[in-house]
Structure formats: structure tokens, C-alpha cells
């Protein structure tokens, strides 16, 4: 073994070098502090997020950035690709892009939503939900699902594959393609690819709707668990289209409070840095963003499917809109805040993505040849997109030699940092009994995190295995118990 | 005719004319021998050693070695390809080659050879040299991180463009490419994007600005066919 090749423990390490084969690191640690009566006094979810990327981008030519940033996430590289492209559109002066370019990007993005949501639900979460959080670990994976519920597993796998195909035909590759470039796209849709996708899209809509119904059944058949598990209230934050519709690709920012009242609307995301503050806490590498004007206690929020589906005024596709209304009814006049409802909302979004893909495929603009726009160069641009797990902000400054001088990224995991901490705290209150950490408890914590974000697992290639450490400390900070998973 | 001269390349007869190197004769006969620093428009340079072959038990650079009657040359053998792989691995660790975000990906000869010769990992420790980019020129970017010191740009600028803009300096692991200007900046030379030197780099050092990724993946030089096939198609053209 080479010296320094493998660190003996990685809790406090931050990556500064990137080699061609490894993905971005990320893992989570939960520390629990107990008092003398074994009551939980402190719970912290520490996520080691890779922030070196912003440094890495500095000094690089701007046109490399949309390709480079895809390495930030193994599950949703397209989101970074498009958020960076949107920011750099402004740098090359493409204040608006051509219809072909916008629709190609949308198609790519909705394909990404579909594949990521399918992966998140079927591969990573359905085992917990179908078998129970305490079920046999050996069964609690997609292989177990395939044995017990072959149809569900098959549909999940094929939905994901369809999404990946959409990405491939729009970006050139299933992962890490190059379709979007600052100012537009580098290719239009091939008619043969369109025909191929059109053959299957109807089936995808049917299966997505089945998946919505599956998640709905899980909720209504066990409300004591699904409505209460990890429950906390918060504001909701997302992009919405100018008319208030759900939109994953473009819009303005909206903030709604936990009762459903819209607090901020129509905010141009170019000004996000006036809106948000990213708080640094001594115990966490990942920052905690909040709405500056509301302060850190009141101004935090959740992002992602549960926020989006309730923050928009309507979903602009018929089947998903029907499902959204049923979902809202579940809140009986209030908002649904239960973390496990993320999955239900996620499946509604997957259905919407499938419907939008079908609509886009019928649009001849996708076959056009007007791919690029440009205009007066600018020194700065912000691009925001709704990524599968929530709002994603990319912000760059570029000098006159075309090199990036400043990059700031706020990823969905960061937006949800406070929210995930809250969910984990609730679960600890609800389920932690005594000092012994069982695999079951550990998995309860994972289930809560996974409702928001499966990405702690993608970072280490171990799909379905969250590289999570849970530590139990006594009142004086002494380590009582420790469990490592993944 | 009895006076045609031949040698054997991996057991197959190859006809050659006097003065041809092994690599040139092999190419003419439709056989690919890997190469990086060799270019049909320039004399052999003999620096990268990718074209290494075995002749009578000795390792020689086929781009520089004249063909001789009756010679037995081994090229496409596990041994020779193993040597080439090791050379490639050294080239990869000497520079900063981050293929996933390099705009030359798919058009890069170094990457294409690594694929063709099944180089699966870098194997050696990375040097991570510190080589800042030169973005001063309005139309061309120099990303020194990827230089493999083939000197094709040096030769093209000097011998074809008549400008002598590039040079290699220092030795060993400190070797690097420099711009012949007092400031060291490309902007302070008369370099132009239409120069031959601006269009010859086999890897991703000399790049036309603001065009990165304009050519989609799937349509790049080595996306559909390996370099061993593409290089031979170029001969036919
Ligand atoms: S810049 Fe390119 S052409 Fe010039 S020496 Fe380096 S690798 Fe060869
Ligand atoms: S090609 Fe012969 S030494 Fe480089």
C-alpha cells in the first residue's frame, strides 16, 4: 500500500485533489448526546460535503464548467450540468435561448427527474417501505423487492432505464454527457430517437401512476406511522413558473410558511444572495441556509418534492394534477409535513415528468437546427434549477480572459440540512430507547434521511447502503456506543 | 518483382521502399503501429516511444528506425502493448489529465490510445504538477496541464508558421512547455488561431476558446471507432 493512499479514518478529511476515476465524497455522521437518564439531549447530523469543487473550478475556462460540475453528484449529474449552463448562458449574453435549445434541455431535465425519482424510490427506499424499517437486512434491498414484488421492481428498473435513455439521446451519454453548452445545446433530437422514446412513453405514464397509487396506499393504510414518523414543520422553498405552476427547469423563487401562507413570491433568483444567508456552524462542514430577513430560527425551510408539490398552485399536466389534489386533501386543509410523504410527492413528480416528456416529444421544435444564442458578454451569472432533491443554485463570475474567478454552489442537500437534522431529531425522540444502538434504530435514522436525500449513498458507489455512522455520547461527551454502516 | 524489399511485421510481409521507416512502411501497407509524437507532415521526433517495436530482440522506435530487408518486427504482441501501456500510464501521471471535464475528450489521441490499449488505471502515483493555464490570448487557451511534450506545436510553429512561438524547457519531471515571449504570455506573441501550431496538439493543451463541447459526444473522432481504425482511415484519404 502506498503511504497516504488510504487514510485510516476520514471523519475530518476534506478532499483537495480529484482523480479521474473517483466520484465526489460525501458521508454522514449522526451524534447523539444522552443525559444521565438516557434521555436524548442532543442530536446532530453532520454531512461531510465536498466543497473543494468551487476552488477547483476557479481558474478554469467557463465552457468547461457545465461538464465538470456533473461530477458533483452520481445520481443527478444533469441537474448540475443544466444549472451551470443556465448561469453561463448569461455570461455569454444569451438572455434567452432558442426554442430548440430550451426544449432539449427540458427534455433532458425531465428525463433526469424520472430516472432519479425512480432510483430514489424503487431502488433505495421501497425496500424499507415495503418490508418495514426493522425487517431483515438481507431482504431490504432491490433484490428482495424483486423476489417479493416482481412487478414493482421491474417497473422501477424500466422507469429508470427510460429516464436514462432520455438523457442519453439529449446529452450524448447516459451519464456525464455534454448536451447543454453556454448559450444553448450542441445537438437537436434525432427523429429515430424520438420514435424510440414515443413507443414507450405511454407505458411509463401508466407505471408512474401506479407508483403514485402505491405510495398513497402506504400512507393511508398506516397513517400512525406515515403521518408521524420524523414529523416536523417548516417553511417550503422552490422555484415556480411565472403563473404559479410546478416547473423544474425555470421560474422564480417562492417561500411558503408551514401553514401554507405565501411569504415571498416572484423573487428573481439572480438576487438569491440578498435573499439567503448560509450559516456556518462549528460542528458541521455543511452550511445552513436561511432566509436572511426572517433570521436563522424562523427562516429555514425544506426543498424538494414535498415542498414543490405544495408550493406550486397547480401541476401543468392532467394526471399529476389529479394526484396533487388528492395529496393536498390528505393535509385536510393544512400542509403535509410528514417526511415520508416526500415519497408520495416524489412519485407525483415522476408522473408529471413522464407526462411532460410525452408532450415534449410531440414538439417539432426538438428537431430544429437553431441551437445557439449569444449577446453581450457579462461577468456574472446565476443559474437555478429544481433538481430531483430540490432547489439547486449555481453562481459564477468570469473574467475577461474567459476564466472563472468565483463559483458558489448551493445544492439541495445543503438547503435541506436543517430539515434533515430536524427529522433525525424527531426520529431519535420517537425511537431511541436506552443506550444500545440496534441496526433497526440505525435504519430508522437512515429512512428519515433517505426520504429527503439518498445521496449520502451515491457518493460511495454503494447504492442502497448509506455510509452513516451513529455515535452515542454520554453527558460528559464520552463515547458509549458506535455503529457504522455502509 | 524480385527487387521489392520486404520485412515481416508480426509475421506478415510488408513491402517498403528504401528510406522508409518501419512505421511509415507499415502504415502504407495498412498496418497500424501506435504513435503520439510522430506526424506524417514532420520528420520523426522519437520522444514518446509509443511506437516501440521489437526487432531482433531489441526495442526500437519504429517511427525513427529505417526498414531493412528481411527484418522481423514484433508490434502487436502482449509484450509490446504492455510496454506501451506503461508509457501511457507514465504520461497520465506526469500531467493533470482529467478526461471527464476535458473538452478534448473523444478527440484526444492520448485518451484514445489508453482506451485502445486497455489502460484501466493510472497505476503509478500522480505527480499533480502545478501548471496554470494561459488564457491571455483572445482566441486560444493554453492548458499546460495536459502537455505530453511531443513538440508538435514547437515544430509546427517553427517550421511551418515561421513564428517559433513554443519551446520545451527544463528536464525530467520539471520539463514544461513555454511561450517564447518576454512575459511568457501567449497574448504577447503574434500567434493566431489559424496557425498550424494552433491546430496540431494531439491532446487538450492548445484549444480554441469558447468552442468547448460544441461537438456532441457520440460524434467525436474516437467515439465510434478506435484510434487504430481511425488512423488507418486517415492514410487512405
Ligand atoms: S502543447 Fe500539445 S503539441 Fe505542444 S508539446 Fe504539448 S502535447 Fe505536444
Ligand atoms: S511515435 Fe515514435 S517515438 Fe513517438
Image (cartoon, coloured by chain):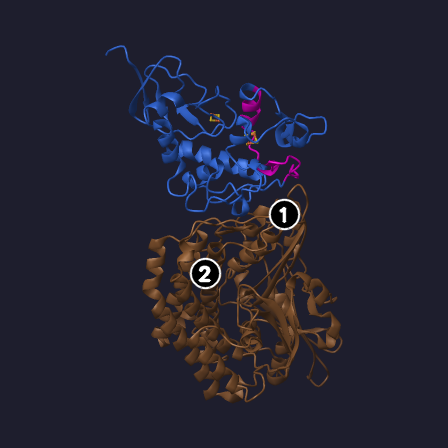
Are marks 2 and 1 in one subunit?
yes
- Quadrant of the rendered image containing residue A114: bottom left
The secondary structure type at the circle numbered 1 is loop
Q: Colour of chain B?
A: blue
Residue A16 in the image: state x and y as whole percent: 65, 51
Q: Is residue B84 left or right of residue A31?
A: left
Contact flag, marks 2 and 1 (Cβ < 8 Å): no
Chain letter for the brown colouring in the rendering: A
Chain letter belonging to callout 2: A
Q: Which residues are magenta?
A: B129-158
Q: Residue at x 44, y 52 (%)?
A: A173
Residue A442 in the image: state x and y as whole percent: 57, 75
Q: Which label lies toward us, 2 or 1?
A: 1
Q: Is residue A65 left or right of residue B234?
A: right
Residue occupied by mark 1: A376
In the picture, the disc for residue A201 is: none
Nearer to the camera, A212 or A82: A82
Q: Is residue A2 visible?
A: no
Nearer to the camera, B83 or B140: B140
Q: Residue furthest left?
A: B1
Residue A346 in the image: state x and y as whole percent: 49, 73
The crowding category of the residue bearing disc 2, from other C-alpha atoms within 10 Å (few below 14, some 14 to 19, many at least 20), is many
Q: Residue at x 58, y 37 (%)?
A: B94
- Quadrant of the rendered image containing residue A26: bottom right
Q: Residue furthest top?
A: B3
Query: Is residue B132 inside the magenta stretch?
Result: yes
Residue B95 in the image: state x and y as whole percent: 58, 38
Figure check: A264 above or below A171: below
Q: Is residue A7 visible?
A: yes
In the picture, the disc for residue A107 is: 2
Figure check: A95 above or below B48: below
Query: Is residue B89 inside the magenta stretch?
Result: no
Amino acid at each position: 500500500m502506498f503511504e497516504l493512499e488510504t487514510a485510516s479514518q476520514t471523519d475530518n478529511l476534506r478532499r483537495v485533489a480529484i482523480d479521474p476515476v473517483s466520484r465526489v465524497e460525501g458521508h454522514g455522521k449522526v451524534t447523539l448526546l444522552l443525559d444521565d437518564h438516557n434521555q436524548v439531549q442532543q442530536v446532530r447530523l453532520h454531512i461531510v460535503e465536498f466543497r473543494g469543487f468551487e476552488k477547483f473550478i476557479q481558474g478554469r475556462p467557463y465552457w468547461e464548467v457545465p461538464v465538470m460540475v456533473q461530477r458533483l453528484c452520481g445520481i443527478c449529474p444533469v441537474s448540475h450540468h443544466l444549472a451551470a449552463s443556465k448561469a453561463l448562458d448569461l455570461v455569454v449574453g444569451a438572455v434567452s435561448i432558442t426554442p430548440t435549445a430550451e426544449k432539449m434541455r427540458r427534455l433532458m431535465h425531465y428525463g433526469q427527474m424520472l430516472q432519479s425519482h425512480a432510483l430514489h424510490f424503487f431502488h433505495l427506499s421501497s425496500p424499507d417501505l415495503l418490508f418495514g424499517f426493522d425487517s431483515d437486512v438481507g431482504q431490504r434491498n432491490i433484490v428482495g423487492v424483486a423476489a417479493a414484488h416482481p412487478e414493482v421492481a421491474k417497473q422501477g428498473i424500466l422507469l429508470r432505464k427510460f429516464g436514462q435513455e432520455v438523457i442519453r439521446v439529449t446529452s450524448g451519454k447516459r451519464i456525464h454527457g455534454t448536451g447543454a453548452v453556454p448559450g444553448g445545446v450542441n445537438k437537436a433530437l434525432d427523429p429515430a430517437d424520438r420514435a424510440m422514446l414515443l413507443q414507450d412513453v405511454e407505458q411509463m405514464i401508466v407505471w408512474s401512476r401506479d407508483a403514485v397509487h402505491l405510495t398513497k396506499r402506504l400512507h393511508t393504510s398506516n397513517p400512525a406511522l406515515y403521518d408521524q414518523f420524523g414529523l416536523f414543520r417548516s417553511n417550503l422553498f422552490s422555484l415556480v413558473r411565472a403563473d404559479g405552476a410546478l416547473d423544474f427547469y425555470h421560474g422564480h423563487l417562492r417561500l411558503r410558511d408551514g401553514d401554507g401562507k405565501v411569504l415571498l413570491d416572484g423573487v428573481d433568483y439572480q438576487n438569491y444572495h440578498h435573499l439567503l444567508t448560509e450559516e456556518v456552524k462549528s460542528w458541521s462542514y455543511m452550511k445552513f441556509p436561511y432566509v436572511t430577513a426572517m433570521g436563522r430560527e424562523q427562516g429555514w425551510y425544506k426543498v424538494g418534492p414535498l415542498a414543490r408539490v405544495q408550493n406550486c398552485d397547480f401541476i401543468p399536466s392532467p394526471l399529476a394534477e389529479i394526484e396533487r389534489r388528492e395529496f393536498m386533501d390528505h393535509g385536510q386543509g393544512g400542509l403535509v409535513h410528514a417526511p415520508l410523504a416526500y415519497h408520495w410527492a416524489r412519485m407525483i413528480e415522476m408522473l408529471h415528468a413522464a407526462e411532460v416528456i410525452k408532450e415534449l416529444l410531440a414538439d417539432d421544435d426538438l428537431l430544429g437546427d437553431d441551437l445557439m444564442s449569444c449577446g453581450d458578454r457579462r461577468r456574472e451569472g446565476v443559474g437555478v434549477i429544481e433538481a430531483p432533491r430540490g432547489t439547486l443554485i449555481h453562481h459564477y463570475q468570469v473574467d475577461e480572459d474567459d476564466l472563472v474567478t468565483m463559483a458558489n454552489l448551493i445544492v439541495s442537500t445543503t438547503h435541506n440540512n436543517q430539515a434533515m437534522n430536524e427529522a433525525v431529531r424527531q426520529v431519535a425522540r420517537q425511537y431511541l430507547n436506552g443506550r444500545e444502538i440496534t441496526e433497526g434504530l440505525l435504519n430508522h435514522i437512515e429512512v428519515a434521511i433517505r426520504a429527503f436525500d439518498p445521496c449520502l449513498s451515491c457518493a460511495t458507489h454503494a447504492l442502497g447502503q448509506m455510509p452513516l455512522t451513529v455515535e452515542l455520547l454520554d453527558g460528559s461527551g464520552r463515547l458509549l456506543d458506535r455503529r457504522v454502516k455502509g | 518483382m524480385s527487387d521489392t524489399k520486404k520485412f515481416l511485421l508480426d509475421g506478415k510481409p510488408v513491402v517498403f521502399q528504401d528510406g522508409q521507416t518501419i512505421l511509415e512502411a507499415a502504415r502504407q501497407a495498412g498496418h497500424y503501429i501506435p504513435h503520439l509524437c510522430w506526424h506524417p507532415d514532420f520528420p520523426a521526433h522519437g520522444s514518446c516511444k509509443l511506437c516501440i517495436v521489437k526487432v531482433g530482440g531489441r526495442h526500437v522506435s519504429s517511427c525513427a528506425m529505417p526498414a531493412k530487408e528481411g527484418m522481423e518486427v514484433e508490434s502487436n504482441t502482449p509484450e509490446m502493448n504492455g510496454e506501451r501501456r506503461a508509457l501511457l500510464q507514465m504520461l497520465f501521471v506526469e500531467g493533470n489529465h482529467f478526461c471527464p471535464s476535458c473538452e478534448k475528450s473523444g478527440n484526444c489521441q492520448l485518451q484514445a490510445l489508453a482506451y485502445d490499449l486497455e489502460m484501466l488505471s493510472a497505476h503509478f502515483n500522480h505527480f499533480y504538477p502545478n501548471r496554470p493555464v494561459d488564457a491571455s490570448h483572445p482566441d486560444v487557451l493554453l492548458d499546460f496541464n495536459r502537455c505530453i511534450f511531443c513538440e508538435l506545436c514547437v515544430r509546427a510553429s517553427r517550421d511551418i508558421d515561421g513564428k517559433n512561438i513554443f519551446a520545451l524547457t527544463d528536464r525530467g519531471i520539471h520539463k514544461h512547455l513555454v511561450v517564447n515571449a518576454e512575459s511568457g504570455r501567449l497574448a504577447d506573441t503574434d500567434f493566431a488561431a489559424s496557425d498550424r501550431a494552433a491546430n496540431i496538439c494531439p491532446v487538450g493543451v492548445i484549444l480554441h476558446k469558447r468552442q468547448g463541447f460544441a461537438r456532441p459526444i457520440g460524434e467525436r473522432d474516437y467515439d465510434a471507432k478506435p484510434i487504430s481504425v481511425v488512423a488507418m482511415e486517415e492514410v487512405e484519404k
